[in-house]
């Protein structure tokens, strides 16, 4: 699995709307890139709805949210509609993205893992675990954390 400090692997894959999404298109903005096991399951729906509830605050801060699973585009479209999601879901039907990020599980589905990707494309933090709540909570904690004050310019 990828770790903080590593570059987030780039990819182009179809979204729930059938349009290609390029990770590189978010360069210059931080991204919450979350992998989930299966569209339509209770835990995945809770996680997706949690991100949807916080989406306005994340977007206002310039943070993009992208969900990824190995489900088909049609399954992703139904899941996005059922959950009322305002952000894209990526279909990693060939499992290449999950493999690149090191989150493909033994059953051929992605393990629930969230990557916080910085505006420069570097992974800043990784959250793992089957429960969906910590992934959403950590996104908000990161967003709401006090930012370090800029260093004062050196005097003459």
Image: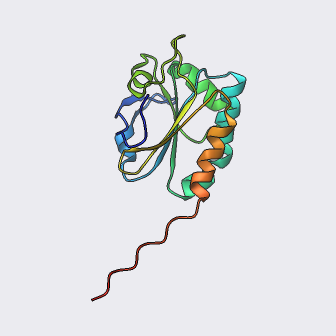
Location of residue 7 (image quadrant): top left
Residue 21 in sight in this render: yes
**Of 29 and 75, the residue lying toward us:** 29
- Residue 54, horizontal then vertical, whole percent: 65, 48
Q: Residue at x 56, y 58 (%)?
A: 60
Image quarter in which the C terminus is found = bottom left
Image quarter in which the N terminus is found = top left
Location of residue 76 (image quadrant): top right
> In the figure, is residue 46 to the left or right of 122?
right
Q: Is residue 98 above or below residue 60?
A: above
Residue 51 in sight in this render: no
Q: Residue at x 58, y 20 (%)?
A: 75
Q: Is residue 99 above or below residue 28?
A: above
Name of the residue lying farthest toward the top? 107
Location of residue 130 (image quadrant): top right
> In the figure, is residue 135 to the left or right of 21?
right
Q: Residue at x 52, y 64 (%)?
A: 147
- Residue 51, horizontal then vertical, whole percent: 63, 42
- Residue 136, horizontal then vertical, whole percent: 64, 42
- Residue 8, horizontal then vertical, whole percent: 37, 37
Name of the residue lying farthest toward the left? 156
**Of 138 and 82, the residue lying toward us:** 138
**Of 60 and 145, the residue lying toward us:** 145
**Of 26 and 117, the residue lying toward us:** 117
């Amino acid at each position: 699995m990828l770790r903080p400090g590593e570059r987030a692997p780039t990819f182009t894959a179809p979204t729930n709307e059938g349009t290609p999404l390029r990770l590189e298109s978010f360069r210059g903005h931080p991204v919450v890139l979350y992998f989930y096991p299966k569209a339509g399951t209770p835990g995945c729906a809770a996680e997706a709805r949690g991100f949807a509830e916080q989406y306005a605050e994340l977007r206002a801060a310039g943070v993009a949210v992208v969900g990824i699973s190995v489900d088909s585009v049609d399954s992703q479209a139904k899941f996005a509609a059922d959950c009322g999601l305002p952000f894209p879901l990526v279909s990693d039907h060939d499992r290449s993205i999950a493999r690149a990020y090191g989150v493909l599980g033994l059953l051929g589905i992605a393990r629930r893992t969230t990557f916080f990707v910085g505006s420069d494309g570097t992974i800043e933090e990784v959250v793992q675990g089957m429960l969906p709540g910590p992934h959403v909570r950590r996104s908000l904690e990161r967003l709401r954390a006090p930012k370090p004050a800029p260093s004062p310019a050196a005097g003459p």
